[in-house]
Image: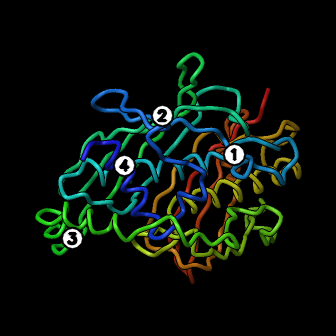
């Protein structure tokens, strides 16, 4: 099985009968969209859909969410690990980190090339790099890295080692593209997020949101909320928090320019339940010129399931 064929099978396997978070991202993995650039990098041709862009905040209409870009990195790098790892392990995300390189934001309808490579994979950890290039001039638009915890258990190693070809052949016979639940064909509906403002002890405004996930927001291998979707939620609520803070003057005082998310890093501490609370708080102590740092988290009960650090920058 060639690399492209292995990637396509991983995409089909992750859907498990038509569902899966990657379908929500409109990635459309196919022989026409995938290209092996060299021995290290695999490229996906992608057109940014409006569904993955901010729409509820002024001056951000049609801007591609960095959180959803990290979602695509997450899916793409996981597929590549399944395709290239000797034991075909998808692993579990530990950290996802990404940053925009160019000044102009990525917008709905823009065509981009997303490239991914496996930097190193061992018994315990897998290291993946991603980058986004302009198809017009080859300039780098964004970069990202993905760290995964690789052990999947002795049963997985045994089955994937000796019987992988038989299992993949059998699975390809029974897994179809049917079963997509159109009623859950939605991502992060900004208008339906329940957002509550409250003053923190330091005077800055903390924003909280109750988030309920459907079956199409889950990781199909592990059955928990997809790490990429958590990134998207934190990017959205982080943008709301810093916009509120700047307009109220509690952070970046005097700034009237809309902030844009330039960098974000998310650490995954434990699986998130389908119903969770997301929080974001601008940090006045970490304001550098036009940059503002935001702490964000996904909470289950009294403990954080994921923690993120987001860096926003106001336009000139």
Please say if the residues under marks 3 and 1 sit with CB atoms less than 8 Å apart.
Answer: no
Q: Secondary structure at mark 1?
A: loop
Sequence order check: which comes first, mark 4 or mark 3?
4
Sequence order check: which comes first, mark 2 or mark 3?
2
The residue identified by callout 3 is 156
Q: Can you tell which of label 2 and label 3 is closer to the viewer?
A: 3
Most foreground residue, 283 or 78: 78
Above or below: residue 262 compared with residue 216: above
The residue identified by callout 2 is 131
Seen in the image, is 87 located left or right of residue 299?
Answer: left
- Residue furthest to the left in view is 162
Most foreground residue, 185 or 279: 185
The residue identified by callout 4 is 7
Sequence order check: which comes first, mark 1 or mark 4?
4
Looking at the image, which residue is at 47% across and 68% down? 219
Above or below: residue 64 compared with residue 300: above
- Residue furthest to the front in view is 173
Q: Can you tell which of label 1 and label 4 is closer to the viewer?
A: 4
Badge 3: residue crowd in 10 Å (few <14, some 14–19, many ≥20): some
């Amino acid at each position: 099985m060639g690399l492209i064929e292995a990637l396509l099978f991983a995409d089909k396997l992750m859907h498990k009968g038509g569902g899966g978070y990657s379908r929500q991202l409109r990635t459309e993995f196919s022989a026409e969209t995938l290209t092996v650039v060299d021995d290290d990098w695999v490229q996906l041709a992608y057109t940014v859909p409006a569904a993955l862009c901010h729409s509820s905040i002024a001056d951000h209409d049609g801007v591609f969410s960095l959180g959803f870009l990290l979602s695509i990195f997450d899916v793409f790098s996981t597929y590549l690990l399944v395709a290239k790892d000797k034991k075909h392990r998808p692993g579990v995300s530990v950290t996802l980190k990404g940053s925009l390189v160019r000044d102009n934001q990525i917008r709905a309808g823009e065509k981009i090339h997303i490239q991914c490579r496996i930097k190193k994979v061992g018994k315990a950890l897998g290291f993946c790099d991603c980058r986004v290039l302009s198809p017009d001039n080859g300039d780098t638009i964004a970069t990202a890295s993905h760290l995964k915890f690789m052990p999947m258990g002795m049963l997985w190693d045994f089955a994937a080692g000796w019987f992988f070809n038989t299992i993949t052949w059998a699975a390809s016979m029974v897994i179809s593209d049917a079963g997509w639940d159109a009623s859950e064909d939605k991502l992060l509906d900004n208008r339906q997020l329940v957002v509550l403002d409250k003053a923190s002890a330091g005077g800055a405004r903390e924003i909280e949101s109750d988030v309920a996930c459907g079956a199409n927001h889950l990781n199909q291998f592990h059955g928990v909320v997809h790490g990429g979707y958590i990134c998207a939620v934190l990017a959205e609520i982080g943008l709301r928090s810093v916009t509120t803070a700047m307009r109220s003057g509690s952070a970046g005082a005097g700034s009237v320019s809309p902030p844009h998310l330039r960098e974000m890093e998310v650490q995954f501490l434990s699986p998130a339940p389908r119903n969770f609370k997301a929080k974001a708080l601008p940090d006045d102590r970490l304001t550098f010129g036009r940059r503002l740092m935001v702490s964000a988290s996904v909470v289950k009960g009294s403990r954080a399931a994921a923690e993120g650090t987001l860096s926003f920058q106001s336009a000139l």
